[in-house]
Image (spheres, rainbow, N blue to C red):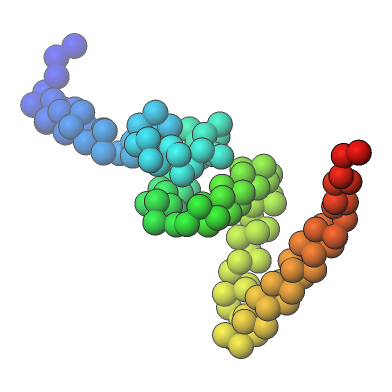
Amino acid sequence: MRLTYPTTLLFAAFLICAPALATALAWTELTPQQQQALAPLSGEWNSLPEKQQKNFIGIAKHYPKLTPPQQQRVHKRLLRWSKLTPAQRQQARERYKSFNRLPPEKREAAKQTLRERDAKKHHAAASAVQPASPAP
């Protein structure tokens, strides 16, 4: 089979551009800092769409600037997200969009309601813990 000049040129251009077309990153291509930040997603990272990977890399970029409690919260949320089914993830995205469409005062009221609910939940959990009795 003999290649013509235009075909050869097209093939060469494809070989040069092919790495740029496949921009999704394998887990092993992430930096150690990115891997630390995104550790809860390690098992499914390679199967995530490129767009989601880019979003998560954005989170990893800010991760080192967070306090340890904030970093723990990010890990808990990533772990919870990784356990959702695709349908549950879509539902969460839709709720997030709906929330952002609310007027600022309603959004703040909803946040306050969630804060109060979480505070009650934490208070109930803390009061359920029995103090250790002193050893005889």
Q: Position of residue 39 (x, y in %)?
A: 51, 38
Q: Does 16 appear above or below 2? A: below
Q: Quadrant of residue 106?
A: bottom right
Q: Position of residue 88 (x, y in %)?
A: 69, 51
**Which quarter of the rendering shows the N terminus?**
top left
Q: Position of residue 13 (x, y in %)?
A: 16, 33
Q: Residue furthest front?
A: 136
Q: Residue furthest left?
A: 5
User: At 26% across and 33% down in the image, what residue appears?
Assistant: 19
Q: Does 67 appear above or below 7? A: below
Q: Does 76 appear above or below 125? A: above
Q: Nearer the viewer, residue 125 or 33?
A: 125
Q: Quadrant of residue 62?
A: bottom left
Q: Is residue 37 visible?
A: yes
User: At 50% across and 52% down in the image, what residue appears?
Assistant: 68
Q: Position of residue 98 (x, y in %)?
A: 63, 72
Compared across the picture, whether 38 is left or right of 20 comes to right
User: At 62% across and 80% down in the image, what residue appears?
Assistant: 107
Compared across the picture, whether 135 is left or right of 3 comes to right
Q: Is residue 51 visible?
A: no
Q: Residue furthest top?
A: 1
User: At 67% across and 83% down in the image, what residue appears?
Assistant: 109
